[in-house]
Amino acid sequence: MAVIYAKQALLDEGWATNVRLDLRDGRIVSINPGTGPEANDTRVDTLLPALGNLHSHAFQRAMAGMTEFRQAGRDSFWTWRELMYRFMERLTPEQIEAIAAQVYVEMLEAGYASVGEFHYIHHQPGGAPYDNIAELSERIFAAASRTGIGLTHLPVLYSYGGAGQAELSAGQQRFGNNVDDFEHLFDAASAALRHLPGDARIGIAPHSLRATSPGELSRLVARHGQGPIHIHIAEQPREVREIEDWLGARPVEWLLDNQPVDNRWCLIHATHMADAETHEMAASGAIAGLCPITEANLGDGAFNGPGYVEAGGSFGIGSDSNVSISLTEELRMLEYSQRLRDMSRNVLVPGEGSVGRFLYTSAARGSAQALARASGSIATGNLADLVAIDSQSAALCALSRDRLLDGLVFAATDRVVTDVWSAGRHVVRGGQHVERDAVFAAYRSAIERLVAT
Ligand SMILES: [Zn+2]
């Protein structure tokens, strides 16, 4: 049994002082406020529930900074996607594992305890399966195991190259499966996942409406009714138009009308929604999977935040393309994108209250739901997904406790993070991941071979 002593902790019921937490088998088994530390306790300043990062494509971390060179008239989400396909085409299984381990270290150091890996490279360059159909899933598992991040694996069904069951393009061959092949992959990945710690989970990810068909999506959802179910839904206006032309409804509207959308679902990039879609999605219980840094980087547009939050909608955050790994920047960008559009301040909180606290605690709960993890708050019985921050750092020391999360979201960087536990695994200590140097050395060597080819 491990014990954490925190000078202050944000519990399910609110702030508490002088708190001892007992951890056993990855869970919080008791919480005792108002007591002093004992000799063997791990002592921290301020303890918070750690967020899950609900949407990642790990391999894209290694292309961060490669696509920011302007070519007049030729820069859009779709031209970025072509560059991403060219980069991805050459990656070996060893490189995919090394990149994933590196980005998972960065996520843990940023204060995330878990990740939803939306995993869509399955095959060899050219599209032939590996001898082990789940080879690349197992590379992700190895990276998760090495770094101790809590993994919710989301193997992707990607059958078509565009709306209306278009053929896969040359750049999409490594993604492609029909539903039967996907089931083989899912079964093999599920079997291999049993070697990970007990908090690891597996769900499904029909890539998007454009990469499946209505009939195949229904088959898949019926077979995997327990969830989680993640789908890219309405990232780009062109995607909305193409789905409207094909299926006769906007993507979120079509999904809500034709699939049993509820709290098992996570709709990634619910960016382009009409007001009626916003209200219906909020009422469905699904999570809006928002990826503010990537959505800004790709020029996607801004989420309909005020309507969604006032309607009681749930959300979480993800780092998606992994162009920048920062929990504080992700939450800040979410609010700032709303302020810039609306020319207003303090947008994302229903009624009145602390924006930082609302964003942080809502994203903690929403990401936990999306990743099917019993976490998202500090409560007895929950997984010990915990982050400690230093309230005496320059960015935070002037703030009262009620403003601390506003300081974290708007004034601090991730450098205020001192410790992170994922399901009780104490992997970040003194601000650094315990395997940081070895993981980085493996990443550097994998990248040198990649850029040399
Ligand atoms: Zn994505």
Image (cartoon, helix red, strand yellow):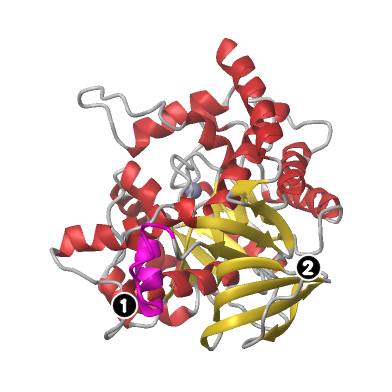
Q: Residue furthest left?
A: 343
**Tag 1, which secondary structure?**
loop
Q: Nearer the viewer, residue 208 or 332?
A: 332
Q: Position of residue 132 (x, y in %)?
A: 83, 36
Q: Is residue 128 above or below residue 239?
A: above
- The amino acid at mark 2 is Asn
Circle 1: residue type = Val
Residue appearing at x 70%, y 45% in the figure: 434
Stretch of the chain drawn in magenta: 393-409
Instruction: Report the front residue among 257 and 306.
Output: 306
Q: Is mark 1 within 8 Å of ligand 1?
A: no
x%, y% of residue 430?
Answer: 61, 51
Give the x, y percent position of residue 381: 73, 81
Check the image and report above or below for 110 versus 253.
above
The answer for how far apart the CA atoms under marks 1 and 2 are is 40 Å
Q: What number is the disc on residue 40?
A: 2
For label 2, count other residues whose C-alpha is less than 10 Å away and answer few (under 14), some (14-19) or many (20+): few
Left or right of residue 219: residue 363: left
Q: Quadrant of residue 357?
A: bottom left
Residue 217 vs residue 75: left or right? right
The mark found on residue 161 in the picture is none
Report which quarter residue 441 is drawn in.
Answer: top right
| Front in this rendered view, residue 266 or 411 | 411
Q: Is residue 337 left or right of residue 150?
A: left
User: Mark 1 = which residue?
Assistant: 349
